[in-house]
Image (cartoon, helix red, strand yellow):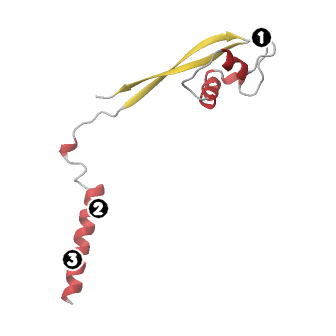
Amino acid sequence: MRTLFVAVILFLTFHIIRIDLGDGTIPLASFFGNEQPCTETTTVKSIYVTTIQGDTIESLFSMYPDAETTFVERLSIFYSLNPHLRNQELVGGLSVQLPLSKAGQENCK
């Protein structure tokens, strides 16, 4: 009986300590300080290009290559810069914005 009583007391003690470590007052202690979150800002360099008849997105990307980003990343950036081209083909005389490369800055202290 004594063993069962000690086991229940130990279980309750360990359970309370585990809950306190995860959600309780210990993570809220003052030794954590006021940390600033690290944010990374990414800016996309781009240029404006006027298309001619027969141009495709792939041909524009090949005329203005970018070794830093993949084709899929560059395509998603292209559609975010030119949302009006999402469901249509390129026509001659259209001015589109082509992404060239990404420049990132970390704001950590």
**As shown in the figure, which amino acid type bears the numbered disc 2?**
Ile
Q: Is residue 12 above or below residue 59?
A: below
What element does badge 3 sit on? helix
Q: Is residue 94 above or below residue 31?
A: above
Image quadrant of residue 6? bottom left
State the image coordinates of residue 102 (x, y, percent, origin top left): 51, 22
Badge nearest the viewer, 1 or 3:
1
Quadrant location of the N terminus in the rendered image: bottom left
Quadrant location of the C terminus in the rendered image: top left
**As shown in the figure, which amino acid type bears the numbered disc 1?**
Ile
Q: Mark 1 or mark 3, which has the lower sequence index?
A: 3
Q: Is residue 87 left or right of residue 5?
A: right
**As shown in the figure, which amino acid type bears the numbered disc 3?**
Ile
Q: Which residue is mark 1?
A: 52
State the image coordinates of residue 21 (x, y, percent, origin top left): 26, 57
Badge nearest the viewer, 2 or 1:
1
Q: Bin the neighbour count of mark 1 within 10 Å (Cα to Cα): few under 14, some 14-19, many 20 and up.
A: few
Q: Which residue is mark 2?
A: 19
State the image coordinates of residue 66 (x, y, percent, origin top left): 58, 20
Of residues 104 and 13, the one drawn nearer to the viewer in this rendering: 104
What element does badge 1 sit on? loop
What element does badge 2 sit on? helix
